Image (cartoon, helix red, strand yellow):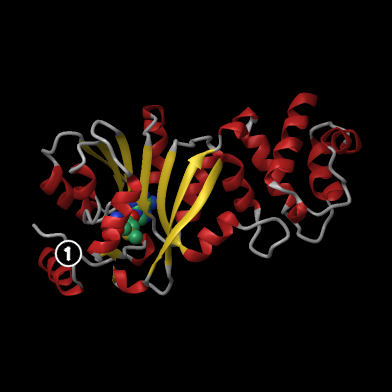
């Protein structure tokens, strides 16, 4: 079976199988072989490596990945696509697929510690999935994701910019992010409304000193809960509910409580979280 390099090939396969695309699952398939090759080269796979693929769809990247001799676990929600993938790759060594919503299934396999995680992520839920991984301290050595360009920009946005958010802080605190290249709408079928960006995330080892990721996330969320309010009111309220003195905490962390959340760097948030941990 071919790779579906054109809309007509893909359309006729979908109609032969009686598949209707489900918008809510962000089913835009990568049909450009050059982009696939570029992604494969960025993945830099080695035989025996343990790899995860999120949302393989009809296998646009799956076969290329399997051909590198890796051990591949896929996560897919669409039962029709799962049947196709099993028909194609079910007897290939190293291939397995986890059916269902990846947000609900991935934690059962967290201890596998894949060395690489790849996904052409659904536009609507890509950021939430990355956030879920990070909040649960799942930070593999190397991630390669395709996301909506705006999401990629939010991930690398610097403090004081309009795109800087709690999501930016979370991403930058636990990983180093590189925007590799944009992928135009024409590279997909059906054609999406937005441009995509391929990003690489690598683990940021020094951030791992934050033992309590939930606490860190709560502090960051509190700081961004109201963009106009000062830290003494946003994070300050959170500290009071924890029985801590905001004045003491801000002084220990060397952070001026009159600042707003959007002015703090990821390092300053990490410092705040560490000081809270010390005092608890
Ligand atoms: N990898 C394929 C490609 O590049 O052509 C398909 C990518 S498509 C943008 C996203 C894929 O993720 C679809 O196959 C969709 O069914 C799947 N998907 C969407 N939401 C999912 C979820 N919550 N859990 C697992 N898979 C999901």
Q: Quadrant of residue 153?
A: bottom right
Residue located 15% across and 52% down the image: 84
Locate residue 138 relative to residue 78 in the image: left or right.
right
Locate residue 125 relative to residue 271 in the image: left or right.
left
What secondary structure is found at the residue carrying circle 1? Answer: loop
- In terms of depth relative to the viewer, which is nearer, 232 or 47? 47
x then y, percent, for residue 94? 20, 34
Residue located 10% across and 67% down the image: 16
Locate residue 27 relative to residue 255 in the image: left or right.
left
Residue located 51% across and 44% down the image: 132
Check disc 1 and report the residue beneath it: 4
x then y, percent, for residue 189? 27, 70
Q: Quadrant of the N terminus?
A: bottom left
- In terms of depth relative to the viewer, which is nearer, 124 or 241? 124
Q: Is mark 1 within 8 Å of ligand 1?
A: no
Q: Is residue 245 visible?
A: yes
x then y, percent, for residue 113? 39, 30
Residue located 11% across and 60% down the image: 2
**Is disc 1 surrounded by few (<14), some (14 to 19) or many (20+) residues within 10 Å?**
many
Q: In this picture, is 84 found above or below 31?
A: above
């Amino acid at each position: 079976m071919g790779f579906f390099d054109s809309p007509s090939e893909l359309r006729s396969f979908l109609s032969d199988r009686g598949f209707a695309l489900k918008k809510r699952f962000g089913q835009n398939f990568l049909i450009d072989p050059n982009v696939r090759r570029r992604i494969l080269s960025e993945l830099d796979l080695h035989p025996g490596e343990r790899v995860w693929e999120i949302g393989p769809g009809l296998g646009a990247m799956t076969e290329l990945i399997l051909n590198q001799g890796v051990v591949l676990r896929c996560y897919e929600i669409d039962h029709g696509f799962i049947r196709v993938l099993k028909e194609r790759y079910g007897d290939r060594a190293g291939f397995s697929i986890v059916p269902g919503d990846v947000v609900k299934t991935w934690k059962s396999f967290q201890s596998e510690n894949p060395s690489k995680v790849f996904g052409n992520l659904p536009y609507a839920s890509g950021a939430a999935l990355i956030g879920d991984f990070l909040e649960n301290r799942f930070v593999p050595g190397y991630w390669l994701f395709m996301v909506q360009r705006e999401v990629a920009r939010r991930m690398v946005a610097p403090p004081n910019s309009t795109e800087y958010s709690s999501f930016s802080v979370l991403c930058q605190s636990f990983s180093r992010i590189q925007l590799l290249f944009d992928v135009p709408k024409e590279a997909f079928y059906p054609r999406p409304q937005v441009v995509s960006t391929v990003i690489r995330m690598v683990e940021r080892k020094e951030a791992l000193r934050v033992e309590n990721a939930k606490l860190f996330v709560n502090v960051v969320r509190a700081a961004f809960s109201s963009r106009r309010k000062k830290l003494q009111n946003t994070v300050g309220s959170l500290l009071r509910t924890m029985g801590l003195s905001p004045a003491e905490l801000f002084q220990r962390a060397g952070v001026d409580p009159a600042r707003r959340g959007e002015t703090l760097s990821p390092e300053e948030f990490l410092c705040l979280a560490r000081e809270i941990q010390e005092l608890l």
